[in-house]
Amino acid sequence: MKEEIINRILSSIILIPLAFFFIIKGSFFFSFFILICFLITSYEWHMLSKKNDYYLIGYMFIIISFYSVYSLRNNFGDESILIFLFVFLICISTDVGGYIFGKIFKGPKLIKKISPNKTYSGMIGGYFLSILVINIFFNYSYILKYDFDALKYYGAEALKQVAPNFDYQIFIMVILLSTVSQIGDIIISYFKRLSKVKDTGKIIPGHGGILDRIDGMIFTFPVAYLIYVIL
């Protein structure tokens, strides 16, 4: 268990900054990044469910999910990077918060028959950390929105004044997307249980496969995309 946690931490230290690089860089770099993720995810889903009736439906959903990922990053002008990171950070912080709080506080299981490692404390931790991280993100989002010249000319304090506020609407959005992310995690756990496997792959030490790490994201990004298109 201790070795698994160490591997998980080391993998995260490498993968999270790498993911942020491709996300912030955008253009070809981002397209290449999500293409690789899509191909690996598709292969893992194929190996997980190739003998089951839901194989094709799941594969089509993965395509739709990655399309929403691409669209959120590219189709909303200057706001695209902020919107994408908003959703991305909710998913990551929900996952990390759930893992940390679940390990520390443990307690009653959430849905023992489907996902035996999920606890109520982990669920609350996911909400708590996602709210905290998004609040911090909003306070410093102006750094991503404005270039160095703007920061130098107007000053950081002036640009902070036009940064988005963490109001009740954002709070509701965070809770909603964090909930979807946690449900997505449980759904993929259900499919893994049906296939009698612990992880969808072994590509990431301490984590499993790509699908193990983006299980919440593949559900959260389509929901977020629909919300932003409708609103």
Image: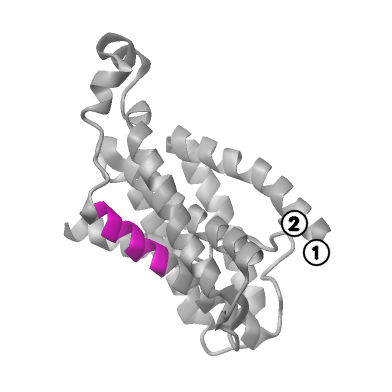
Counting other residues with Cα less than 10 Å from the Cα at mark 2, is it few (<14), some (14-19), or many (20 or more)?
few
Q: Residue furthest top?
A: 153
Residue 82 position within the rendered picture, expressed as x and y whole percent measured from the top left: 34, 40
Left or right: 188 as drawn, with respect to 173: right
Q: In the structure shown, which secondary structural element does the residue marked by tag 1 occupy?
A: loop
Q: Secondary structure at mark 2?
A: helix
Please determine whether, in this image, residue 195 is positioned above or below residue 217. Answer: below
Q: Amino acid at mark 2?
A: Ile
Is residue 49 in the magenta section? no
User: Going 40% across and 40% down the picture, which residue do you hit?
Assistant: 136
Residue 142 place in picture, x, y as percent: 32, 29
Label 1 packing within 10 angstroms: few (<14), some (14-19), many (20+):
few
Placement of the C terminus among the 4 image quadrants:
bottom left
Image quarter in which the N terminus is found:
bottom right
The residue singled out by tag 2 in the image is 5
- The colour mode here is one colour
Amino acid type indicated by mark 1? Met
The magenta segment is 170-179
Mark 2 to mark 1: distance in Å?
6 Å
Q: Position of residue 130 (x, y in %)?
A: 43, 54
Query: How many marks do you count on the picture?
Result: 2
Please say whether residue 192 is visible from this viewpoint: yes
**Residue ID for mark 1:** 1
- Left or right: residue 123 versus residue 139 is right
Magenta segment main secondary structure? helix
Q: Is residue 27 above or below residue 212?
A: above
Determine if the magenta segment contains residue 172.
yes
Contact between labelled residues 1 and 2, with CB atoms less than 8 Å apart? yes
Position of 192 with respect to 57 (left or right) is right
